[in-house]
Amino acid sequence: MQPRAERAQVAVSVVFDKDSYRTDEDIHFTVKLTNTGETTAAGLTMYQMVIDSTDVQVLYGGWGQLQNKPGVTLEPGQSFEVAVSAQVRDLEATTAAVRGIVFDGSGNSAGPQFGFSVPVTKAAGHATGTVYGDKNGNGVLDAGEQLAGIKVTLRYTHGTGTYSATTGADGKFALDVPAAEYYVGGDVVDGWLFPWRTVRIGSDTDLLFRGAPPLNGALKATMAFTQDTYAVGDLAHVTVTLANSGPIPLTGIVAECNRVGSDHVLSGRGPGWGELAAGGVTIEPGQTRTFDVSETVPKAAFNRGYVLAACDFGYPEVDIENHAQAEDRAAVPGAKGTVVGDVKQGQQGVAGVKVVLVSDQHCPVTGEQTTDANGHFEFHDVVPGPEYRLYLLPPAGLKVKYENPTSIDVWGSGESRVGIDVEQGDAPLPSVPVNPADCTAGAPTSTTGAAGGTGGGGQSGGSGLASTGVDAIGLGALALLALALGGGLVFGARRRRAA
């Protein structure tokens, strides 16, 4: 029996750069890890405990190399230091704490839980301000636009504290709050749209909160990449066109992009987006404006097969359901994926099911296979990017239990797996698309099948595509040609809505 490997032993110390902090200050400290054991401490990462209200908030990435794997490796006697910035989470607390556990690459703790604290004093803040409804849309407070009876709520950015006041007849309010950073807005109040924004409250801060009229469908938007294809790392340019068909200016319009949070979608942030990502732009009544925005094509676009720009346009983070939406995509060629599936009746594989892989491109039929004795089928060298569906033609006496055709998502450098259930019975076969005549020359005739795959047996309803069992590229150059000829697709990205 081999002796158990010695566990890593790591000591943790925390040194604050000040003896105490105010609530409106960032808390800066240095964390030092020292390997006090006799074995290598490999893959060290930090797990910060955020349970009590006194535990500080460290923004994602703030732990540096200790944030995620591969972490930090220390030989016996070695040390590692990282400078960290944090914020107070409880504006009423008198202390702020840094607590956590260090884990090694095996998932074991490399030492006991640690905890260090520092005194915090509440810095008094005072905010006054005016709330107005911008009836004429010019973005400034005009006589008679003050709004009475509007509840103004400041929400602490790094915690849960909220502070509210209601405007008087003159539209003014006053609040005594701890000095700190807050966010306000994102609400529709009495028909006025109050954009989301952050404000820093000090000892005497004067604020002006604008309520904008509803868009009422007056804003229309389009987006178009300036090239059909890009490579990862290219600076992609997108032409944004905004048009205002309403009677008043639309002042402070911004772009909010990639609400779905996918890595292959442009973020809509950064200097390349100009005022659409900052203070917003103004579109006068009857005016159409174009903007050239730019952003680097993200790495994930390669395996997705395209880069997507998907944005909504309106006032920041308010009434987003009524924002103008636009999107466009451009190909990022080079990747190839695999579609792997099994057709089963219960636990038994079903042989002889004809499977046709169809895309939404000009030449839709990508490949055709027939399931082998185990009900298995495969399509190789499938170009990611288009939307694909699988059409299934089972033998007589069997029918597909659920959707037929069924959608499948293809990514490069990986397998897209699908399971198909069939059952006894008869059902009309789906009508399989047929490639146009101009797809005949040079069109792929099949894709690689599973080992031992059969050559036929499914019900009639073929695509007009031969199944030869040889390798083919799938859409290959045809997909890129379709994009180059203007056949690029517009993908609908789902939007997550603000609460």
Image (spheres, rainbow, N blue to C red):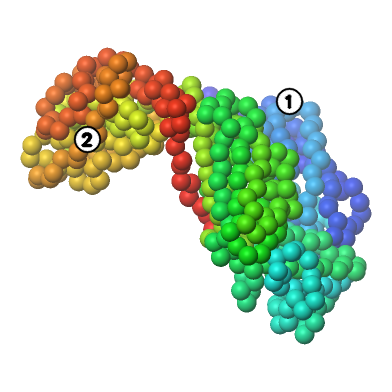
Indicate which disc residue 99 carries: none
Residue at the extreme bottom: 169
Q: Quadrant of residue 43?
A: top right
Residue 472 is left or right of residue 484, and the answer is left
Task: Give the mark, 2 or 1, whose residue is nearer the N terminus.
Answer: 1
Which SS class for mark 2?
A: loop
Q: Is residue 98 above or below residue 168?
A: above
Residue type pointed to by label 2: Val
Residue type pointed to by label 1: Glu
Tell me if label 2 and label 1 are in contact, CB under 8 Å.
no
Residue 19 is left or right of residue 415, and the answer is right
Residue at the extreme front: 286
Which SS class for mark 1?
A: loop
Give neighbour class at mark 1: few <14, some 14-19, many 20+ (Cα, 10 Å).
Answer: some
Residue under pointer 2: 432
Residue 353 picture location, percent across and down = 17, 31
Mark in front: 2 vs 1: 2
State whether residue 484 appears in this view: yes
**Location of the C terminus (image quadrant):** bottom right
State whether residue 374 appears in this view: no
What residue appears at the point 78 percent right and 55 percent down from the top-left corner?
A: 87
Q: Is residue 200 above or below residue 484?
A: below
Residue 124 is left or right of residue 267, and the answer is right
Q: Nearer the viewer, residue 445 or 51?
A: 445
Q: Is residue 437 above or below residue 45?
A: above
What residue appears at the point 75 percent right and 59 percent down from the top-left corner?
A: 198
Residue under pointer 1: 75
* Disc 2 to disc 1, C-alpha distance: 63 Å
